[in-house]
Image (cartoon, grey):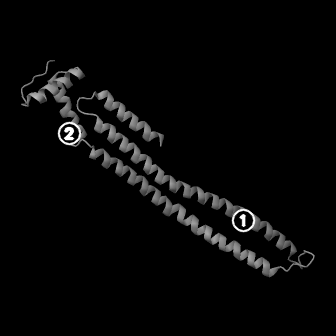
Amino acid sequence: MEKKYNKSVRFTEITDEKFGKIAEKLGRSKQDLLAEMVDYFYKSKKDPADLSDELLKKELGQGINRIISFIKVQEKDILAPMLAEHKIQAGQVKELGSQFEAFFEMLPEGKMRGQFASLATEMLRSFHSSKEVLLEVQKNQREVYAMLRGKERLQDHYIKILENYIQVRDGLNSLTQSKLIRDLQDETRRQLKMI
């Protein structure tokens, strides 16, 4: 079915020349190309005068803010209670050590005195296992701190990808083939998936 064109648009000769070159490059008629351009800007809600893609920057910024909010919630819900528990456990272990020294007196031969010898041995085992648990907790805390530092590196990666996209996008103009634009978008998506 043939399309009916019943409206006209007036523009300068220079604009007509550029428009003709774009239509020729893309293998479309000027009418079809104009309809596609209008659809593109209508659907994407982009301002053709905004060459720096402020909308894309805003969307990426919101995504980064959501990630940061998630990490802050994890800090509050997981890391803070873990650190408080570690502090309590460290105090308990220290107290156990003090009680151990007060309760059991060592003889000069290195033997423990009285009926508490077996209890002392059991407490020593408990103390060593608590120490191992504390070492594991400390190791986990270092990993959590490393993850928090990774948050900053993740932000840096997003910023670099965004800056690369903006720089390359600014280098593209309306004469650039849509394949180059799709390639840029695909490359940006690939870089984001690699993070």
Tag 1: amino acid? Lys
Q: Residue at x 53, y 65 (%)?
A: 80
Tag 2: amino acid? Pro
Across and down, in percent, residue 117 comes to: 87, 74
Q: For residue 51, what is the image quadrant?
A: top left
Q: From what the image shows, is residue 167 above or below residue 88?
A: above
Report the side of 161 relative to 92 (left or right): left
| Nearer-the-camera pick, 79 or 115 | 79
| Nearer-the-camera pick, 173 or 134 | 173
Across and down, in percent, residue 191 comes to: 43, 39
Q: From what the image shows, is residue 66 above or below residue 182?
A: below
Across and down, in percent, residue 178 comes to: 29, 28
1 vs 2, front mark: 2
Determine whether the residue tagged by mark 1 lies in a helix, strand or loop.
Answer: helix
Residue topped by disc 2: 48
Residue topped by disc 1: 131
Q: Residue at x 64, y 58 (%)?
A: 139
Q: For residue 141, what is the image quadrant?
A: bottom right
**Residue 31 in view (yes/no):** no
Q: From what the image shows, is residue 24 above or below residue 191?
A: above
